[in-house]
Image (cartoon, coloured by chain):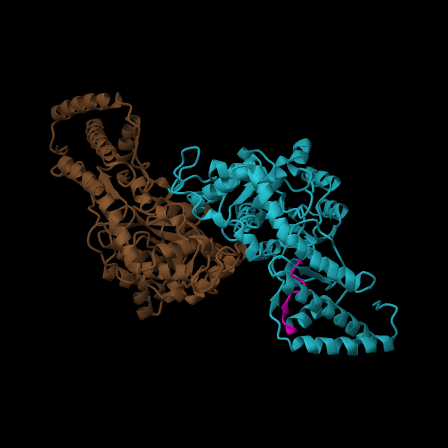
Chain colours: A cyan, B brown
């Protein structure tokens, strides 16, 4: 199906045929959901041994009674787990509560209210703003939006953010004080940043506002579907460039063990950690160390974590294959959209023809298939091209995903044909 | 030992004798700690059944898979537990993470950055400030201090804050936008607010800044040592006065189950909850529902919680008795200090003669007994009378507490005598 070269008659015939198909599907009263990157019950079950794993022994190897108050930076053995995931020294890691999103929120808050490492608090700048590679993660953007921090789109490429655009923006505007990154299996495009991108990111602090921080949300650090994809170390790159203060790294076990009940980590330079801990000190006596101990017992060795992730991959791979093969079969030789083929992570990013995404999501919803809202992958929910749709294959069972994708494809076709017909 | 009526010779004789005793104690190289209100290992053990209690069944009664993302306001059964503790309707409760302090921080943040229920954000006022009944809880004060919110001392009486002072301050200053309260077994004085105090508190919103909020930190709601002490309902009082938006209530299971690994609760009007949830939405996908489920299974009935708290009381009572009997024996007919006799909670508040607290804490530290820093119970760490010391009997074993109290008493005597001798 090639829209651009189709005659009006052809388009009208397609519209009629696709509409009839769509009407039939609507009668099935489907209720399917491929919106959020939630693990499936089958994946969650891999970690069900967590509850009860302590077997009455609540003492950590270093003697800490995890049941009591204290320990702002988290349990040593949990920090070691975070250090393994992020491939950084334990001394640079804080192990916190159940959400890396919460850690990012507090890190933005620290920069905004108090400033990192003695720098001017962002709220004292005229128009503080973050660079946002797009499409990106809606919850990153929501943090900035809530605090009134501006957002500037920069395009994603297949090797990371468009670094020419990033550098130009920063040179032009000293009020740019942040950059959101999901450096491995980027949300949603699935891209892993290459060495050149990481090196250029590590050099930004040489000409950015001294308070500028890269938020390195390594949410999918160990979430490879097949062979391990190597993400160049941002820490090593910043050490080479003497810019270690410019990066804050995040990870969690949310998509490793139980999604809402894991452990989150932040890694940063000692100056940044000092700023963060000062903020945290007024907010908490310490994280849930009992749950941290559960996790470090569950993953007593890093190899156990790797093996555990392979079990996730075995469950996820057929789902990604389902999405990708349906897209390939339907659109492989069509002009109806483009997509990425991720080697890990949680998403497949699909771009419709410009101006079609909202219509596709609406059609799918009316047919009982819930998609992430069009625009959600952009700051303020505004996709200037109205084309990006994030597909999350992980949660539904395979047969439901298969049905949902068939509906999705039909909706893309129908929306595209109707749009073309509506053009003058 | 009565200082005021003692001759100089008598004081000198006492000083010599007490100094000698003190020197002997210093040689014991003690290392005792009665600083923080931490439960003892024996108390923590009461809840060791928590880990493993789920027995592989991670589904809540309402069908929620607690292992996955979602549920900003917490699990229904956990909210019911919070509602039981605070004696409020479940619909007014959010069940959150492991710390009510964190909830309070975020509530202050909500008021400060965004304003509650459509009111002016506190940061937009000229000099926003909280009223702080003193002595009070240092971690409350630390939140205000970090955000640059001013603090105004008001005296505690044996029925709650001095309400004449509270009302006068609020009438004088519309920039007063908060009031810290620990209404039952107040930290540190052990006082429980009486009906008149609660009623007058509920009326403050009738003449305070519309953004004014009472932070009702009911940390010891169910922490009675003997018979249950009744705290009049602030919710009922505000409903009578049409001021329900003026109160935010907090509680947690920190001193019920495991101190760092419990569940925290906030209860508020729907307008306040809407403001809080808006803030939370950018910060978190939801709390650790697995741990919430553990707690609601552990306390399947409210009577089980009551029985559990009686076991705590049995452990705590001899410790409070130790502190109180030592104080009574040493100072019952002396003029060296005053103290409260709490019926629950975690502290005994002791007032030295004015100007002696810092010296007592220093002497004790040098003899190996760690006390809460003098001044800690006041905003900015400044006790204008330098007299209040918070004693926390819960953590050390009874024999250690007994030794620590003997040292404490000696230090009070020695500091008092030396101070009197130094007077012109």
Task: Establish if A141 lies above or below B384.
Answer: below
Does A374 appear in magenta? yes
Q: Position of residue B182 (x, y in %)?
A: 31, 52
In this rendering, would B78 be left or right of A191?
A: left
Image-quadrant location for residue A71: top left
Image-quadrant location for residue B41: top left
Q: Quadrant of the C terminus of chain B?
A: top left
Tally of marks:
0
Determine the residue positioned at 34% across, 46% down. Answer: B137
Q: Quadrant of the N terminus of chain B?
A: top left
Q: Which residues are magenta?
A: A366-378
Q: Position of residue A206 (x, y in %)?
A: 69, 37
Determine the residue positioned at 12% across, 23% down. Answer: B9
* Dominant secondary structure (helix, strand or loop) of the stretch shown in magenta: loop
Does any portion of residue B125 appear in the rendered image? no
Image-quadrant location for residue B302: bottom left
């Amino acid at each position: 199906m090639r829209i651009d070269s189709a005659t009006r008659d052809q388009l009208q015939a397609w519209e009629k045929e696709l509409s009839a198909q769509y009407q039939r599907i609507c009668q099935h009263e489907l209720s399917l959901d491929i919106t959020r990157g939630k693990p499936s019950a089958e994946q969650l079950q891999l970690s069900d041994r967590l509850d009860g794993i302590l077997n009455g022994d609540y003492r950590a190897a270093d003697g800490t009674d995890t049941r009591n108050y204290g320990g702002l930076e988290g349990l040593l053995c949990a920090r070691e787990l975070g250090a393994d995931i992020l491939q950084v020294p334990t001394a640079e890691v804080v192990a916190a509560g159940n959400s890396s999103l919460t850690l990012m929120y507090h890190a933005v808050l620290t920069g905004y209210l108090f400033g990192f490492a003695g720098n001017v608090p962002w709220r004292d700048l005229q128009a503080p703003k973050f660079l946002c590679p797009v499409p990106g993660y809606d919850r990153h953007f929501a943090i900035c939006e809530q605090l009134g921090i501006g957002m500037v789109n920069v395009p994603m490429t297949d090797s990371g953010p468009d670094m020419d655009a990033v550098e130009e923006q920063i040179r032009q505007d000293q009020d740019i004080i942040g950059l959101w990154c999901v450096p491995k299996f980027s949300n949603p495009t699935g891209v892993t940043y290459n060495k050149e991108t990481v090196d250029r990111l590590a050099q930004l602090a040489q000409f950015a506002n001294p308070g500028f921080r890269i938020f390195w949300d390594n949410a999918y650090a160990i979430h490879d579907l097949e062979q391990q994809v190597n993400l160049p170390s941002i820490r090593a790159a910043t050490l080479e460039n003497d810019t270690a203060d410019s990066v804050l790294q995040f990870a969690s076990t949310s998509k490793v063990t139980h999604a809402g009940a894991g452990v989150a980590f932040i890694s940063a330079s000692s100056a940044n950690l000092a700023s963060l801990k000062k903020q945290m000190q007024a907010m908490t006596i310490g994280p849930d160390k009992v749950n941290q101990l559960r996790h470090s017992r569950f993953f007593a060795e890093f190899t156990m974590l790797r093996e555990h992730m392979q079990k996730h991959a075995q469950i996820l791979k057929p789902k990604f294959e389902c999405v990708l093969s349906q897209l390939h079969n339907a659109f492989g030789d069509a002009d109806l959209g483009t997509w990425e083929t991720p080697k890990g992570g949680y998403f497949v990013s699909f771009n419709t023809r410009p101006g079609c995404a909202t219509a596709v999501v609406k059609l799918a919803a009316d047919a009982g298939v819930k998609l992430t809202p069009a625009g959600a992958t952009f700051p303020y929910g505004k996709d200037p091209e109205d084309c990006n749709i994030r597909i999350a294959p992980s949660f539904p069972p395979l047969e439901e995903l298969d049905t949902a994708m068939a509906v999705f494809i039909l909706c893309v076709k129908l929306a595209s044909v109707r749009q073309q017909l509506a053009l003058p």
